[in-house]
Amino acid sequence: MLLNSKLVKFKAIFRLSYFIPVVTTLVAVAIVWRFIYHPRFGILNYILSLAGIGQIDWLGDTATAMPAIVLMSVWKNFGYNMIIFIAGLQNIPEDLYEAASIEGASGWQKFRSITLPMLAPTTIFISIITMIGFFQFFAEPYIMTQGGPLNSTLSIVQYMYQEGFRWWNMGYSASIAFIFFFIIMLGTIIQLKIQKSTE
Amino acid sequence: MIKKYFLYAFLVITSIVTLVPFIWMIGASFMFEGKASVFPPIFLPDPFTTIQYKILFERLNVWRNFFNSLFLSTIVTLLYITFTSMAGFAFAKYRFTGKKVLFNLLLSSMIIPSQVTMLPLFLMLKSMGLINTYMAIIIPGLANIFGIFLIRQYCISIPDSLIEAARIDGATDFQIYRKVILPLAVPILVTLAIFSFLGTWNDFLWPLIVLTDDSMYTLPVSLANLMLEHTKDPELMMAGSVVTIIPVIIVFLALQKYYIKGIMMGSVKE
């Protein structure tokens, strides 16, 4: 969000570094992160050890495996969401800010009363897109945990894949797909409804 | 002034966070076996070696997978651009029976996630005997409504007078498409080409389902397979990851303007 500010130089470089995770192959990225989460040699545990926190088996513990995968996805999609926020910011008319300045609003007040409400549709869009994206989760758990430990990171698409293409339970797999479809459709309908009501 | 420093500090820190995994990946890929599994982690290979890449290409035959990925991504992109641009042009500039119904039908199919269609698609391809062939990747990638929609929007903005002028000069419909529409639509075509190329290159689930032979695998599938066998070889796996993402990074760096524009379009118009 800050990247839209006129203060910042080297915009292109920052934008680039945020964007590399978005375009790179998910499988490759998941493999790299698998080693970052390595309980003994991983970078993350090293950084935590500097703060005096002991070794955590990120992907091997039912309590931390899911947050670990989510963290990686947030890292990967950061640039994408940022670009959409920038697009939203650029759609806010400049004169709103001018009017606020004339009436003596502070920077924070402007942010709270103009930027945030004007960005509401964008925020909703991103939330729904992200939610749908997480329902479609596949490569991340497949590479990093194989759905384990104890199925704690098994995603619906992965479940569908396992039933259908590993055990060849096509019927069961198809019903999973059908439920999955309804969930996604629900998300999309909510998205469209909100978008219409804000327009 | 202080605000500015804060801003820069924030940006620099977040950039570092996004880049550290890649730096470690590149560093580790040039290390000898076992050198990356140390505590604390190191980023610079010492001594420097390309042995992991040699293993990858000479012993594990990754060339083949690299070729598969490159070939499929290129072919799919070329065909995708051809078909979506024709369809988009037709939906924008021609009047025919059922146009509206057909277009709305296509649009509403956008709501169906691709994973849901995989089962029936698999069974269809299987009955055609196309499982484990390149066609199994190429056929489902030929066109999608997202591309048709974007090209249609773009073509609508092209003035009818241009097309009429060409027609008066005696151009056939195909010539109009070829000589008038295509040159004008280059920006949107480039954007879609990047999406299609990256999408095909990065795709994992579908190739995993329909390709069953080592020699047919695309890079991500082959990499995922390697991972299951070489869990304890970070250096080798990092080299594999580097090989997988280099083409993607090159395409992105060369055409990033179009890519970012495309993402913005998708979000504003949807």
Image: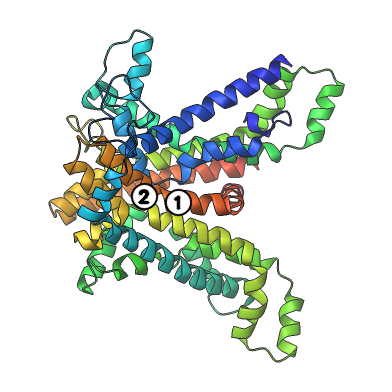
Q: In the visual, does B265 lie left or right of A136?
A: right
Coloring scheme of the render? rainbow
Q: For the residue labelled by badge 1, is the local secondary structure a helix, a strand or a loop?
A: helix
Pick out the residue farthest to the right. Answer: A102
Q: Amino acid at mark 2?
A: Thr
Q: Which residue is mark 2?
A: B244
> Residue A24: x, y in percent?
43, 45
Farthest residue toward the bottom?
B170
Can you give x and y, in whole percent of width and height, for residue B115 in the image? 32, 53
- Horizontal side of B127 relative to B103 (left or right) equals left
Indicate whether B229 appears above or below B188: above
When asked about the image quadrant of residue A49, the answer is top left
**Mark 1 and mark 2 residues within 8 Å of each other at the beta carbon:** yes
Residue for point 70% across, 39% down:
A90
Question: Residue under circle 1?
Answer: B248
Q: Is A157 on the left or on the right of A11, as rendered?
A: left
